[in-house]
Image (tube, rainbow, N blue to C red):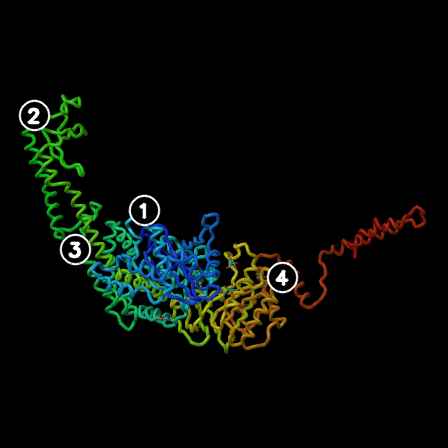
Amino acid sequence: MSSTATLPTHCQPPPMPLSEYDDEGQTEIYMCVLWFAGELGITYYDTEDCSIYFMSGIPDNEDLKLLHKVIDEVLPQCILSSAKQDHTLAKFLNNVSATVGGKQENGKPEVVFYPNTDFGLEVSKQRILSKQFPFIPSHMTAAEKILYLSSIVPFESPLVIRAIGGLLKFLDRRRVGVELEDGDVGVPILAFKKFVLTDIVHVDQDTYCVLQIFKSEIHPSVYKHASGKKEGLSLYGVLNHCRCKWGEKLMRLWLMRPTRNVTELNKRLDVIEFFLLARNHETVLTLQECLKNIKNVPMILRRMALSNTKVSDWQALYKTVYSAICLRDTCRSLPSTIELFQTISQVFTDDLHYIASLISKVVDFEASVSENHFSVRPHVDPIIDEKKRKLIGLSDFLTDVARKELQDLDNRIPSCSVIYIPLIGFLLSIPQLPTMVDKSDFEIEGLDFMFLSEEKLHYRSTRTKELDSILGDLHCEIRDQETLLMYQLQTKILEKSTVLNNVIEYVAHLDVLLSLTVMARENGYTRPRFSHSQIIRIKDGRHPLMELCAKTFVPNSVHSSETSGRIKILTGPNSSGKSIYLKQVGLITYMALIGSYVPAAEAEIGAVDGIYTRIHSRESVSLGLSTFMIDLNQVAKAVNNATERSLVLIDEFGKGTNTMDGLSLLAAVLRHWIRQGTQCPHIFVATNFHSLIQLRLLPDTHLVQYLTMDTHQDGDELVFFYQIKEGVSMVSHAANIAALAGMPPQVIARGVEVSELLRNGEPIRRIDHSSKEKQLESCKSLVDRFLSLNLDDPQLDLKEFMNQEVLPSASSIL
Ligand SMILES: *[C@@H]1O[C@H](CO)[C@@H](O)[C@H](O)[C@H]1NC(C)=O
Ligand SMILES: *[C@@H]1O[C@H](CO)[C@@H](O)[C@H](O)[C@H]1NC(C)=O
Ligand SMILES: *[C@@H]1O[C@H](CO)[C@@H](O)[C@H](O)[C@H]1NC(C)=O
Ligand SMILES: *[C@@H]1O[C@H](CO)[C@@H](O)[C@H](O)[C@H]1NC(C)=O
């Protein structure tokens, strides 16, 4: 196993093996949105793979939640819509954009409105049908072309067609991606791809962050320009052992979009299960070896479409195609009962052989590299062969010509040569004699003087002119001819680009699943089972990130169902592992919902439709909102949106506000869910509000189960077992934790005393008295002074004595 498969035992980010891809600058996304009669038409153009993505007419209601989700995920540079739009969408888009005084605020998309006529249905259809797509073979008739296009473009959805039409118009007007090209170079469109957002599990930004799905400061969509960047400790970082860029990209997408389509999840798990079998280990290694050679094909295709193909692109493409054939042949030998293998066997068509043989027959890699120019192999083009032969024979031939020239020259001239300069042609070169000083001395009869350089005089002669016309600018001609051939080759390959797009798509699937296989094997993960009932049952689960950092990790089980309580209230001292437990439940569920094996002995998960979290983290505090505001915000989201299929994780609710407010709100929220009965979500609440239990703020119901972290009092020391058990932690272990933190014993003792008195409703006495001896002494001195008073003295002011002497001493005596 190669080094990338070893574990990050010290929590360093795993290496990203992918710096070889040239960074082609940032990817840009241009999106077009139409909304009509409650349906959305969304399409966008991605400059990275020059593809148009579309989402078929999908319903979205007034609050445009789905659109919001898509925008959050895709992060478009620019959003286009029709000027004549429904009021709601216009308002929504204007709100999304942040054009402040003509300048884009960081990260917010620009919003552009075009006249409604640009989005007409007929106009749009025509625009699509009349466009020259490189992937449409030139030999197709108009009718064949329409047939072909209608198999990949959803002509049955008017809204999507109108959106695509508008987008095409926009791309051409802006000249997206071809700003620097000649005017006749169109915006390359290399594929149409459908994207789906059905069956997604709701996850919000906070959850990505607190569950450490992605490293906090990086938005999940940064995969677009993430090459070479290191990912900190995150689920993505730990799971990602992908061998090619497309695998990494898809891994991020899966992690960003967990699904509850159980069919899809089981398909993924089937592949992992197959790869995990010991007898398939060799196959895994073979496939991974091939995956390493899958290069940046979309970028190469894009350069082909713009006729900017580099020598290295031909090599990279050849290597990719060759490896794709190897992948296909391997998959053909695997059981076709597994859909991915069958799909790869089929869609990696013989067009790959066609492309590979075309490249290997035409491209002379060795010469191309040494000349840094596309060079054609012999026997491809007779004209080029002929010219090259001439060029090779040229030096002997020129010596011959030079000998003839010398015979015709003045005897004083000892030698001469004939040279070839590209773009200028052939010249006679003569050494400058000492007698030749002035320009007039350079003139030689019958020769046209051209220039003096390095003490050599250069002339055109009748013979060199003859050579020019016979041999022409041989070099240039060969190059031109070769370039022409390269264009033809490009066109032929672009016509077969469908197979290359399929390669990228399925290679990514294979890569991600192999990567998940590696993790599953190395960490002893198990296959989760999906259940139709609303259940989360995990036996001996582990935290997938913590277990990599800790020497030993105590596994814990989870059982949330109608019979075992859907609301778990978790109490226990600080640092006993409550938050870890909460995150562990979240992470294991999350992993199951992307189709990964999970760190547990067994796991059974119902189709979870959303994960709502309120877990304190450094990141969310830094937003400048008060903790309690974030609390309310996040918990409100859960209260408003969580269904009986959702998972809700709440840690330390009410931490930032006064105890009474926090406690009563938490109780109110929980009572709200308890009232929902069987519709209650899976809820895990970790809290320090022991009064929630002591004051019996929740009704007695089988829906609620109390859990605590097992601890043991060993003399003064509190031992944590990190083991969950049923029950309630009544004592706060604050004293033990304070001792651990180095608090002086007398301070702790007093704390325990006061806490005890409070609980028993007894008065608390001050302890800052002076000592008994001092007290006695001051008493004595006061009495002495009193006795020394002469009460008969008429001058004696008793009032004064009381004020000056007695009262000040009182506080130290009483
Ligand atoms: C506009 O966005 C802000 C937050 O960015 C939100 O509070 C407000 O409700 C939005 N308004 C509309 C009309 O969507
Ligand atoms: C679920 O996934 C399967 C295959 O992965 C797909 O055929 C099916 O359409 C999906 N179901 C839905 C409702 O999207
Ligand atoms: C859930 O409810 C909140 C209101 O608290 C709302 O702002 C949010 O958009 C809703 N939807 C989701 C998916 O969170
Ligand atoms: C636990 O720690 C939090 C701060 O993180 C503090 O607010 C809370 O009072 C502590 N609770 C106990 C029981 O020590």
The disc placed on residue 361 is 3
For disc 3, the neighbor class at 10 Å (few under 14, some 14 to 19, many from 20) is some
Cα separation between marks 3 and 4: 78 Å
For disc 2, the neighbor class at 10 Å (few under 14, some 14 to 19, many from 20) is few
Cα separation between marks 3 and 1: 33 Å
Q: Earlier in the sequence, mark 1 or mark 2?
A: 1
Dots 1, 2 in contact, CB < 8 A: no
Kindly tell me whether residue 720 is visible in this rendering.
Answer: no
Quadrant the N terminus occupies: bottom left
Apparent side of residue 629 relative to residue 793 in the rendered image (left or right): left
Dot 1 beta carbon under 8 Å from ligand 1:
no
- Looking at the rendered structure, the secondary structure element under dot 3 is helix
Residue under circle 1?
180
Q: Earlier in the sequence, mark 1 or mark 4?
A: 1
Quadrant the C terminus occupies: bottom right
Q: Earlier in the sequence, mark 3 or mark 1?
A: 1
Amino acid, disc 3: Lys
Amino acid, disc 4: Asn
The disc placed on residue 658 is 4
Q: Earlier in the sequence, mark 4 or mark 2?
A: 2
The disc placed on residue 410 is 2
Q: Nearer the viewer, residue 11 or 152?
A: 152
Amino acid, disc 1: Leu
Q: Nearer the viewer, residue 520 or 670?
A: 670
Dots 4, 2 in contact, CB < 8 A: no
1 or 2: mark nearer the eye: 1
Apparent side of residue 605 relative to residue 618 in the rendered image (left or right): left
